[in-house]
Image (cartoon, rainbow, N blue to C red):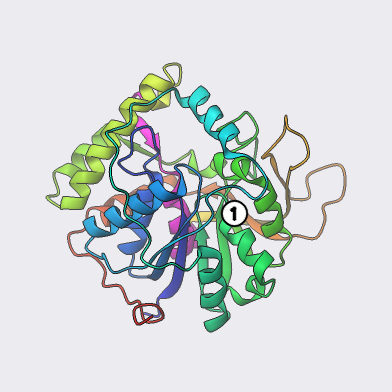
Amino acid sequence: MTRIPVIIDTDPGLGEPGSDIDDGLAIALALRSPELDVLALTIVNGNVDVHTGTHVARDLLDRLGVPGLPVVQGASEPLERDMRAVRSLFAAVLGATESPAPLELRGPSTEEHAADYLVRIAAQRPGEVVVIAIGPMTNLAMAIQRDPSFAGNVRELVLMAGSATGYAQNITVVGDLNAYADPEALDIVLRSGASIRMVGIDQTSQVMLTHADAESLRRTGDPFAEYAANCTDGWIDFLGRAFPGREEHRTACFLHDPLVIAAVTHPHLLTWQLADVQAETESELARGLVVANRGLALEPAGPPNAEVAIATDVDGFRRLFLSRISRETLTHIHNSCTSKE
């Protein structure tokens, strides 16, 4: 099997109080997928600040038995927005969380900026590397700004953002976190000419992880599966307190980002359609709104710039995720383009 070289651009918060666990589970799924050759994790500000995300990524790779995988730190702020406004919205939506005592955060494994790393690796391997972006798109936009040829050098950008079949209704009533935190960056990516596939929150909100799933993972005897189970139970309990009126969060949480990994390893689990995708950057009320015009609007759609997911095989994905996240033997990872640098 020829494995797909991928870079995962992410804002992981697994194990941090009040932070979604799905980025960490997505990274674990990728590392346990024999279809993928994970080259590096590039870290972006989003779900957590970039320094915390870097620390979480390093800890996560230790737990998964691959401490040498490069962790490359990127943007600490959106391209244009003051992140304090977004953090305030987090607090309003999720409520205040108790942080543990300050700890010494582990830094990246290289001083190279994530945008420069993305540009360099894509140029070294033109047409080969898939970038899976499961955080805000700031690092990708910076890579495009620094070298527009990046868009043509990557094989594909696979993004977790927007909603192709309805409103996102996530961090705001129209915007998901990844789009809302830096819509200017998403706009740059969508206009870049890169080959793009998008998995929106309309699809990722269909796939869930339950307390019962966590207990099943805990019984496997796999150390990481047990850790993931404990984090899952804690996150579900947090969501139940934060959103007492939402029935789905009494026993389950969403698997947003892991579905995006499956879009690369098992694209047949999703149904795809070409669309003209645009991100709203002007209106504060509609900030982060992503419109995927699939030819259904009154006005003619523009030329398609992405494929968007419009349906998901939920049962098929759940079987894939649960079988791989609990596997005891971690897929061997080759870092041929980075390990000697």
Q: Residue at x 38, y 26 (%)?
A: 239
Give the image location of residue 85, x and y in percent. Answer: 60, 32
Query: Which residue sits at x=50%, y=44%?
Result: 46
What segment is highlighted magenta in the picture?
A: 250-268
Residue ID for mark 1: 138
Vertical relation: 157 (above or below) 127: above
Q: Is residue 125 visible?
A: no
Quarter of the image where one finds residue 233:
top left
Identify the amino acid type marked 1: Thr
Residue 256 counted in the magenta span: yes
Question: Which of the two residues, 324 or 319, is positioned nearer the viewer here?
Answer: 324
Query: Of all residues shown, which one is farthest toward the right?
Result: 299
191 left or right of 180 in image: right
Give yes or no for residue 329 being in the magenta stretch: no
Main SS class of the magenta portion in the image: helix
The percent coordinates of residue 234 (x first, y second) are 28, 32
What element does badge 1 sit on? helix
Q: Position of residue 225 (x, y in %)?
A: 21, 49
Quadrant assignment for the C terminus: bottom left
Classed neighbour count for the residue bearing mark 1: other residues with Cα under 10 Å, few (<14), some (14–19), many (≥20): many
